[in-house]
Image (spheres, rainbow, N blue to C red):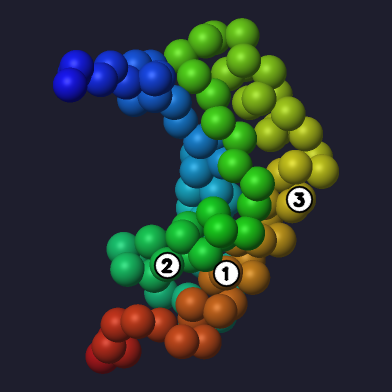
């Protein structure tokens, strides 16, 4: 048997730009939802839930593709879609947090 080589050696440089956008929106909205604490566990739950709701936008190390995708994500419609998904995830997590109540 011969040693196999990875089909995509550049895969380690691929990133989902939606993750960045979701985190930015989370940070802007975290104090807007009643009952949402914003701790690390809740933030992770919100981001995970939101990532499963939105189509990923991957980019490689290529600057041109990254710039185009980032510009698309700054459009009002894309930002509104991301905001709605993050807010809904925050409401769900606030209603059933996976940690003990503060106090």
Quadrant location of the N terminus?
A: top left
Q: Name the image quarter holding residue 63.
A: top right
| Mark before the other along the chain sequence, 2 or 3 | 2
Residue 21 is left or right of residue 72, and the answer is: left
Q: Which residue, as the protein is rendered here, is positioned at the far right? A: 77
Residue farthest front in this picture: 1
Disc marking residue 89: 1
Residue 53 rendering spot, x and y as whole percentages: 63, 59
Left or right of residue 33: residue 3: left
Q: Which residue is mark 3?
A: 80
Q: Are marks 1 and 3 in contact (CB under 8 Å)?
A: no
Gap in angstroms between the C-alphas marked 2 and 3: 20 Å
Q: Position of residue 11 (x, y in %)?
A: 39, 24
Q: Where 31 falls versus 78 (above or below)?
A: below
Where disc 2 sits, the SS reads: helix
Residue count near mark 2 (Cα–Cα under 10 Å), binned few <14, some 14–19, many ≥20: some
Residue 24 visible, this angle: no
- Measuring from the top left, give residue 73's x and y in whole percent: 69, 34
Q: Secondary structure at mark 3?
A: helix
45 and 38: which one is in front?
45
Q: Residue at x 52, y 10 (%)?
A: 62
Q: Which mark is residue 45?
A: 2
Could you tell me residue 17's position as x and y percent? Answer: 54, 34
Q: Is residue 89 visible?
A: yes
Crowd tier of the residue under label 1, counting other residues whose Cα lies within 10 Å: few below 14, some 14–19, many 20 or above: many
Q: Earlier in the sequence, mark 2 or mark 1?
A: 2
Check if mark 2's residue and mark 1's residue have beta carbons within 8 Å. Answer: yes
């Amino acid at each position: 048997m011969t040693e196999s080589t990875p089909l995509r050696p550049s895969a380690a440089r691929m990133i989902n730009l939606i993750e960045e956008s979701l985190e930015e929106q989370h940070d802007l909205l975290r104090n807007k939802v009643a009952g949402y604490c914003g701790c690390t566990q809740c933030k992770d739950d919100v981001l995970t839930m939101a990532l499963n709701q939105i189509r990923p936008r991957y980019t490689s190390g290529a600057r041109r593709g990254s710039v185009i995708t980032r510009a698309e994500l700054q459009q009002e419609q894309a930002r509104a879609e991301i905001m709605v998904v993050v807010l809904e995830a925050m409401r769900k997590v606030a209603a059933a947090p996976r940690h003990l109540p503060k106090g």
